[in-house]
Image: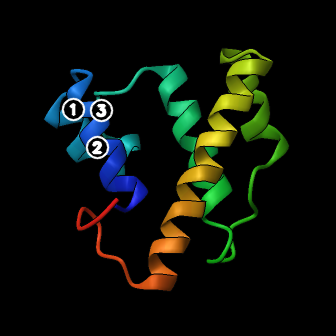
Amino acid sequence: MEARHAGVTSAKRQGETDDRLHNVVIWRETPFFTEPERTALALTEAATRIQDGRPGVTDEIWAAAAAHFDEPQLSAIVLNIALTGFFNRINRAIREQAGKAW
């Protein structure tokens, strides 16, 4: 199962709302996320959108995240970003459809 699909399934099991899940792609324009969540989303976006010419995680983005999260929390966020990317790339390589297996 694609990591994104697994993440949504897990989030719903833990009580996450459809409003937040459906609007995470436009997190900047919605009222559904707290400031710490917004910094985590900015960090995630910066870490993953490097292929389209984005600068990656800048000092400003890291500092904003570090203002809300301690080192173990930042490590967990970065690990989750990396694992999601890893599983998405495996699924892409083997042409596994999200939600079909795993």
- Residue 55, compared with residue 11, is above or below; it is below
Q: Quadrant of the C terminus?
A: bottom left
Q: Quadrant of residue 89?
A: bottom right
Write the residue at 68% across / 40% down: 78
Q: Is residue 34 left or right of residue 64?
A: left
Q: Position of residue 29 (x, y in %)?
A: 33, 42
Tag 3: Cα neighbours inside 10 Å, few (<14), some, or many (≥20)?
some
Q: How is the image coloured?
A: rainbow
Cβ atoms at labels 1 and 3 below 8 Å apart: yes
Report x, y in % for residue 67: 73, 17
Whether residue 84 is visible: yes
Can you identify the residue that label 1 sits on? 12
Which residue is at the far front? 102
Q: Which residue is rendered at x = 35% and y = 77% of the image?
A: 96
Q: Is residue 24 visible to us here?
A: no
Label 3's element? helix
| Nearest to the observer: residue 8 or residue 49 | 8
Compared to 5, does 8 lie above or below? above
Numbered-mark total: 3
How much space separates mark 1 and mark 3, taking CA atoms?
Answer: 4 Å
Amino acid type assigned to the residue bearing label 2 in the image:
Val
Amino acid tagged 3:
Ala
Where is mark 2, residue-wise? 8
Residues at discs 1 and 2 in contact (Cβ within 8 Å)? yes
Residue under numbered circle 3: 11
Q: For this rendering, which residue is in front, 5 or 60?
A: 5
What's the residue type where badge 1 is placed? Answer: Lys
Q: Is residue 34 left or right of residue 12?
A: right
In the picture, measured across the screen, residue 75 lies left or right of residue 91, that is: right
Are the residues at dot 2 and dot 3 in contact (C-beta closer than 8 Å)?
A: yes
* x, y percent for residue 73: 68, 21
Furthest-left residue in this view: 18
